[in-house]
């Protein structure tokens, strides 16, 4: 039986909001989900049921889909959703203005101990919380899509977020089965999107300058680096790739990385390059097949998560 019993409010019932609802309900929380669009809420239960059933089929939930789904209720208003919540996970549109407005409203409606978090992918906490009386209880908690399969959550507080709030949020995400990491300072893109951006930037440059095809560059990750990356990061990798650890690796190969870095320039994301990449992708996967392929990806991810759960750390 899952261990959590806090109430969690999820604001925004789109892709990420629904996924968070599953994370918390799976862990035992009662979840109230709210959306400004009534049709988003109306569709919510069917979509949630589909996703939770997929998890059950892969053995990734310990209860029946119905039991997990029964913990999620739709709220008729923001106030109703926030009532009694330990933590609010906001997942509305990605603009600073919208985030400022919703955090101002949530700050008025939430109880004094409620933690207010945002799923924003790019907007620092300071940008939407600076003017608000309850800014000490606000922070970014950036997930990876879908958070019920990919556990990383990046906690990125503002300088004025109370350390006690960050600690309480970290504890809630960890108990919900997520893998929280903490940004010690604010930076646009947080950690994951900055690293993903560096990889994309280099892949775009290599493609644009004619070094390899789209398919081969994707293969470098899926049959090369990515295999290792699902269980260790770049620092542990270099620690193990020379007999005496990190310093030994740096002594052997550091100069080559320094030389390569001098040739790694920013990429402008030119329309012409992106159109060519689009064309190469559409040759192997038609637009009509995108949805089915995304479902295939999620099923592969579920199998991988299942495998990782059975391994020692
Ligand atoms: N999609 C991703 O891969 C991903 C990954 C990580 C983080 N995020 C972040 O999560 C957030 C949500 O993204 P998404 O992909 O779920 O978007 P989405 O468009 O699927 O969902 C947004 C939902 O918010 C609702 N909404 C808009 N304004 C509202 C308001 N004022 N009050 C209540 N509901 C409101 C909309 O009706 C919609 O249902 C964004 O900040 C995004 O950057 C997205």
Image (cartoon, grey):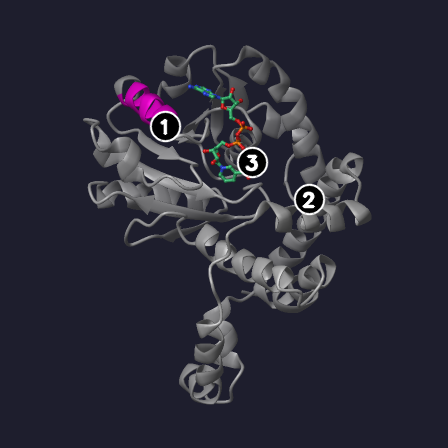
Distance from mark 1 CB to nearest ligand 1 atom below 8 Å: yes
Image quarter for residue 147?
A: top right
Q: Nearer the viewer, residue 111 or 214?
A: 214
Compared to residue 65, the image places residue 148 above or below, namely below
Q: Please give the name of the residue rendered at 38% of the width and 24% of the height, measured from the top-left corner.
A: 98
Q: Which residue is mark 2?
A: 298
Please state which of the two labelled residues, at mark 3 or mark 1, is closer to the viewer: 1
Q: Which residue is mark 1?
A: 99
Location of residue 89 in the rendering, given as x and y in whole percent from the top left corner: 42, 31
Q: Tell whether 62 sits left or right of 284.
A: left
Magenta part of the protein: which range? 97-107
Is the C terminus in the top left, top right, bottom left or bottom right quadrant?
A: bottom right
Please state which of the two labelled residues, at mark 2 or mark 3, is closer to the viewer: 2
Q: Main secondary structure of the magenta part?
A: helix
Tell me the SS state at disc 2.
helix
Q: Which residue is mark 3?
A: 26
Q: Earlier in the sequence, mark 2 or mark 3?
A: 3
Location of residue 55 in the rendering, given as x and y in whole percent from the top left corner: 67, 39
Is the N terminus in the top left, top right, bottom left or bottom right quadrant?
A: top right
Q: Is residue 151 highlighted in magenta?
A: no
């Amino acid at each position: 039986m899952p261990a959590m019993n806090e109430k969690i409010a999820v604001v925004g019932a789109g892709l990420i909001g629904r996924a968070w609802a599953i994370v918390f309900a799976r862990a035992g929380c009662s979840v109230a989900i709210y959306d400004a669009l009534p049709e988003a809420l109306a569709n919510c239960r069917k979509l949630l049921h589909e996703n939770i059933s997929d998890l059950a089929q892969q053995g990734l939930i310990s209860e029946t889909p119905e039991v997990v789904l029964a913990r999620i209720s739709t709220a008729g208003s923001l106030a109703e959703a926030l009532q009694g919540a330990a933590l609010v996970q906001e997942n509305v549109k990605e603009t600073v203005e919208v985030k400022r407005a919703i955090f101002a409203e949530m700050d008025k409606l939430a109880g004094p101990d409620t933690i207010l978090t945002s799923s924003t992918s790019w907007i620092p906490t300071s940008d939407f919380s600076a003017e608000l009386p309850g800014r000490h209880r606000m922070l970014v908690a950036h997930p990876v899509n879908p958070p019920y399969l990919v556990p990383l959550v990046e906690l990125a507080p503002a300088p004025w977020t109370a350390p006690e709030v960050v600690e309480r949020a970290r504890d809630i995400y960890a108990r919900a089965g997520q893998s929280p990491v903490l940004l010690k300072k604010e930076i646009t893109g947080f950690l994951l999107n900055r690293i993903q951006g560096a990889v994309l930037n280099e892949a775009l440059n290599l493609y644009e300058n004619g070094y390899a095809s789209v398919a081969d560059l994707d293969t470098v990750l899926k049959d090369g680096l990515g295999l290792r990356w699902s269980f260790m990061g770049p620092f542990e990798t270099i620690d193990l790739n020379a007999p005496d650890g990190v310093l030994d690796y740096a002594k052997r190969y550091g100069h080559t990385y320094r030389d390569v870095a001098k040739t790694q320039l920013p990429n402008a994301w030119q329309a012409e390059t992106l159109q060519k990449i689009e064309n190469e992708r559409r040759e192997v996967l038609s637009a009509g097949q995108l949805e089915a392929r995304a479902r295939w990806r999620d099923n592969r991810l579920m199998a991988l998560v299942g495998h990782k759960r059975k391994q020692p750390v």
